[in-house]
Image: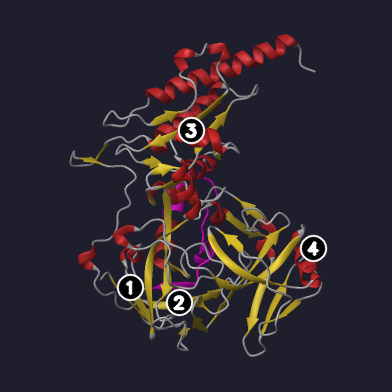
Amino acid sequence: MFSVNTLFFSCRHTSSLATYVRKKMLDMKHRNKKNVCIIYGLEPSKVADLKTSPTITFNLKREDGTWFGYREVEKLASLSGIHLRTGCFCNPGACAKYLGLSHSDLVSNFEAGHVCWDDNDVIKGKPTGAVRISFGYISTYQDAEEFLKFLQSCFVSKPIASSNGHALSMNTLNLVDNQSQQVVPDVRLKSIIIYPVKSCQGFSVQSWPLAAGGLKYDREWLLQGSGGEILTQKKVPELASIRTLINLELGKLFVESPKRKDKLQISLLENLIHLTAEVDVYGQRYEVESYDEKVNTWFSEAIGRHCTFMRCSSSKNSFCTSTGKNGRLCRDTRSKLNFVNEGQLLLISEESVSDLNSRLSSSNGNGKQHVLVDAMRFRPNIVISGSTPYREDNWKRLHIGDAYFTSMGGCNRCQMINLHQNAGQVIKSKEPLATLASYRREKGKILFGVLLNYEDGLNGQEETVAERWLQVGQEVHASTE
């Protein structure tokens, strides 16, 4: 039991920490003297230090006045070992009040697909939530200084002097000059990977057919939790141990798990149990088909929690809420999407992975074991070789064989790429996301790889798809026009 004195000193300690951090945050300025931190709640001058809440709710602004999204702040904080809460904290009324969101803003955000825990942290130039840091009785001034140091290093703009004395801007993603990249020769398709079940292991093939949704059967199934949530490796790391394989000749999906002795076989062609209600996956609405209890029990035992196995029947078209660099849409409004977050396919360049590994090696030159990654860490659908690092950033269109694709822009990476398996155990580290954040960060995103949509999937208004296949070894032709 805490005594009255203990509680008093604990409150005084946490209030003192919060007051110190709040004042330091309000003093933070960009190089153009603009404020970095916007703190919500009562004005500090109107609250006595001992009555100051140990919680600070805030958002951060760039020097041009735009907002850092709370997801970006949370993602970078986690890499520094700092735990923050983000969103609206189950208080939509206070959230709307302090963020200046009108009723029409809230309706518009909902219609744009924004829901709790998604990545839509800034819509139409306004934040949809905030960041919160809290101090407890075990928090120290060293913790406070580490948090302030994190804000300074990641969000405060400072002139960086180059060798010729000119100032360079920070956090700018340097893309390849468009003029030098009209056509890229000698680039070939190195690998093709299919992920039938969202967040489970994929399998590599030498050739594979394309469909309206991209690679046939890619991410056509998923697992839904007992509360209606979509299960991913970020929430359920055990999904990483589930192996999948599709045999096109047999027309079957095979699924294996180290926690199940029997291999699950699912027909690709048989009718399923019934059509369920629509399911929302990151703002995209889907009609799904479900399976019998035998299949659901198999997956539940494989991951150690109750779940439902579902197959995508159709996706509802949704409007794009933002545009990417060079006017490219972040989500195509015409193309069919299976259970993907944005684009139909993800392309990774071996040369970009090699450049990342060289940076990982140099950052671990202090005697620590090198952390190296391969292309599979990023769950790509297609891997290319023969290009130069990050040349794919500026591609707008490309064709492989007789199939054409449009780039939807860079892929925003999350903590999932920090998960890897070692001797059957799922290991989580800070890399490679921490290193990527140091040089691949742009406007709230940490980009690596590009998202593609298959453009041969629509013929006028009919969703008829010509039978086309990708094959390892095919030439990749890309342009920036």
Please name the residue that numbered disc 4 is placed on. Answer: 301
The residue lying toward the viewer, choosing from 33 and 314, is 314
Q: Residue at x 49, y 21 (%)?
A: 42
Of the residues shown, which amino acid type is indicated by label 2? Answer: Lys
Q: Nearer the viewer, mark 2 or mark 4?
A: 4
Q: Earlier in the sequence, mark 2 or mark 4?
A: 2
Locate the N terminus and report the quarter of the image it occupies.
top right
Q: Secondary structure at mark 4?
A: helix
Please name the residue that numbered disc 1 is placed on. Answer: 397
227 above or below 197? Answer: above
Place of residue 345 in the rendered image (x, y in percent of width and height, measured from the top left) = 47, 70
Q: CA distance from mark 1 to mark 3?
A: 44 Å
Q: Residues within 10 Å of mark 4 (few under 14, many from 20)?
A: some
Horizontally, residue 56 falls left or right of residue 322, namely right
Of the residues shown, which amino acid type is indicated by label 3? Answer: Lys
Name the disc covering residue 341, or none: none
Please name the residue that numbered disc 2 is placed on. Answer: 190
Please name the residue that numbered disc 3 is placed on. Answer: 97
The residue lying toward the viewer, choosing from 272 and 8, is 272
Q: CA distance from mark 2 to mark 1?
A: 19 Å
